[in-house]
Image (cartoon, rainbow, N blue to C red):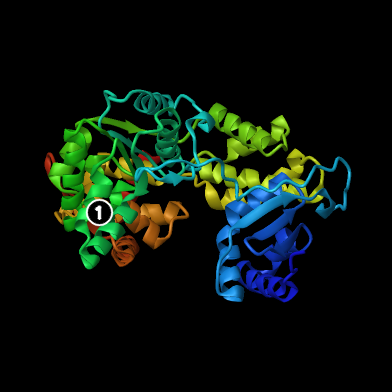
Amino acid sequence: MEATFTDEISAIQEHLAREIGVQQYQIWFRNATQLTLRKDCLEIAVANPFISQWIQSHFEKPLQKAMEAALHQRHPIHYRTDRSLSPAGSKTNPNPAERIPAGRSKPIRSAAGKTSEPLKMSLDTFIVGAKNELAYNAAKTVAQQEKSPFNPLFYHGGYGVGKTHLLQGICNEIAKNRPNAKWLYTSAEDFANQYVLALKTRRLDAFRNRFRNLDILAIDDIHFLSNKTAMQEEFLHTFNSIDLAGKQIVLASDAHPKEISALCEKLVNRFVSGMVIRIDPPDFDTRCRILTCRAKKMKQPLRKEVVEYIAGSISSSVRELEGALFKVMAYSALTQKPISLEEAQEVLSEHIARTDPVVHHSDITGAVAEFFHLSPADLYSARKERTVSLARSLAMYLTRRFTKMSFPEIGKVMGNKNHATVILACRKIEKALEQNTPLRWRSPAGFRSVPAKELLDRLMEKIS
């Protein structure tokens, strides 16, 4: 008979409550879960599959931190369903207790030829619509053909539009259909960190062997290499090694290769030599289908009017769309009844106000760049000419004023600028507006000078 570890469980619960806050702990753990510490794992009994998925998505890291703080070690987390833990105390339709090892499935082959767990996303679960059909078809082609016509395949677009989903989906599809293929999915930040570690430990040969002897290399957030000259040089050699061997490279970034500031010209040329695809936020019909599919997967179908309300209210990002869905599902799971349109509107009122701005960053930068006869790449660059500097400052100011983005977030999307640079730009424009100072720049027809308030009105008209 296994020990119950009552004191250890209490310590984990106390640390967890401090990690996530008392209110969150009471909602998701106090009444809806039961923790049991086994010799080889921490077992969490949950009221229903939805709560299991929610905890895995939102609280797995705090749970691991709580375990480490309480036990000075970490254990795998296993989940099982126990209907008797329902907030309403319902014991109807009981299901057999079923252990689920943290939402994973059978092992597959990794880049190193060792067994590894599958990545989270698959192409089968990608919802295809008018705005992402080309991106999806290219992903299927790369996954199905050993030598695809798209090399490299470069995805770019805003956050939460499906870039990571496609990269992981390609790797999972290749692992399933070509079990002997060597593949690696990672982020540019992880590439950079491993490179630094290899330098410090004098293991560059092992690092290069891992990244260059692949059938497919998929790297997310490649814009992270901006302003990192040594790492760009290393990645250039990695790119060339894989490309010359006739193998596949798939990349994703927030911006088009030519719009990533401080990216060396050789890398830009390599990136644009293949297939560059922009992914836009999904349209209304696609958003409805995403919500419906996610709800069915969680076995909690939503009413059509609730689906259409969420899809009509949030348009910028699939992540924000899913965040709203999870909030609605949480309310439904805790009240044990389908949510009505009126309840959904009340539950999501704050969420919608905070997530989906009327004007988006891309709208602002596009309008400002066009007004000053520049490209968005000029705004993201480090150029300091009068016209570029003024346009960049105005774009930063307008983004701060009309979106929910913080100074660091604006700096990141504007070419990895320091947040202090954004603050100074905003103060500069605010001061010019207070005094209505004439702002001067060079246009194709020569120098122009327009009072700050009038210039801002023109830009606002263009954005709207």
Residue 311 position by quadrant: top right
Residue neighbourhood size for the residue with mark 1, other residues' Cα within 10 Å, grouped as few (<14), some (14–19), many (≥20): some
Residue 420 position by quadrant: bottom left
For the view shown, which residue lies furthest in the left direction? Answer: 446
Which residue does the image show at 71% across and 45% down from the upper left?
A: 49
Question: SS at mark 1?
Answer: helix
Question: Is any atom of residue 395 visible in this view?
Answer: no
Residue 139 position by quadrant: top left
Question: Is any atom of residue 32 visible in this view?
Answer: yes
Instruction: Please tell me whether residue 435 is drawn above or below residue 156 in the rendered image.
Output: below
Quadrant for the C terminus, please: top left
Which residue does the image show at 32% across and 62% down from the upper left?
A: 422
Q: Could you tell me residue 385's position as x and y percent?
A: 14, 54
Q: Could you tell me residue 132's position as x and y percent?
A: 43, 29
Q: Could you tell me residue 275's position as x and y percent?
A: 27, 29
How many numbered circles are shown?
Answer: 1
- The residue nearer to you, when weighing 152 against 282, is 152
Report the side of 436 relative to 167 (left or right).
Answer: left
Q: Could you tell me residue 112's position as x and y percent?
A: 34, 45
* Badge 1 amino acid: Phe
Report the side of 348 relative to 253 (left or right).
Answer: right
Residue marked by disc 1: 207
Quadrant for the N terminus, please: bottom right
